[in-house]
Image (cartoon, rainbow, N blue to C red):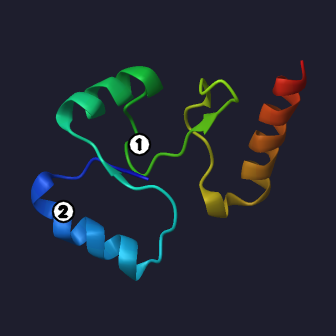
Amino acid sequence: YISIDKPQWDDRWRQSISINELEGYHFRADSEFIEDMWLQIGDFTGAIPRYVLLDKEGKIFKSTAARPGAGDVLIHQIESLVESEKK
């Protein structure tokens, strides 16, 4: 998870991780990281939350991936990524 919230919301961000039992890696981005992230991902519209699918090389496969709860839509996107990796 990458947080691009305002620095003054740091406590709320940390509480949210705990309350929602979010496992995995959590990173608070600084302004330089945020600017570079949007340059890499592109399409600032929709902003957050944003889900991105990366290939094995770490390259962006889908910059507007479906949310984890999207079911079949996300499954189809992941299957497309797997198929593209086979080529």
Q: Is residue 72 left or right of residue 12?
A: right
- Residue occupying the point 37% across, 77% down: 18
- Residue occupying the point 44% across, 53% down: 1
Q: Is residue 36 left or right of residue 83?
A: left
In the image, residue 25 sits, relative to residue 15, either above or below, namely: above
Viewer-closest of 33 and 76? 33
Q: Is residue 7 left or right of residue 56?
A: left
Where, quadrant-wise, is the C terminus in this rendering?
Answer: top right
How would you rate the neighbour count of disc 2 (Cα within 10 Å): few for under 14, some for 14-19, many for 20 or more?
few
Mark sitting earlier along the chain (2/1): 2
Residue type, mark 1 in image: Gly
Q: Which residue is mark 2?
A: 10
The secondary element bearing badge 1 is classed as loop
Viewer-closest of 81 and 70? 81
Q: Is residue 29 left or right of residue 19?
A: left
Residue 17 quadrant:
bottom left
* Residue 48 position in % (x across, y down): 38, 49
- Residue occupying the point 27% across, 27% down: 35
How would you rate the neighbour count of disc 1 (Cα within 10 Å): few for under 14, some for 14-19, many for 20 or more?
few
* Residue 63 position in % (x across, y down): 55, 32
- Residue occupying the point 75% across, 50% down: 73
In the image, residue 41 sits, relative to residue 9, either above or below, namely: above
Q: Which mark is residue 28?
A: none
Residue type, mark 2 in image: Asp
The secondary element bearing badge 2 is classed as helix
Q: Residue furthest top?
A: 87
Q: Which residue is mark 1?
A: 46
* Residue 74 position in % (x across, y down): 72, 50
Spatial CA distance of label 2 from label 1 is 22 Å
* Residue 54 position in % (x across, y down): 62, 33
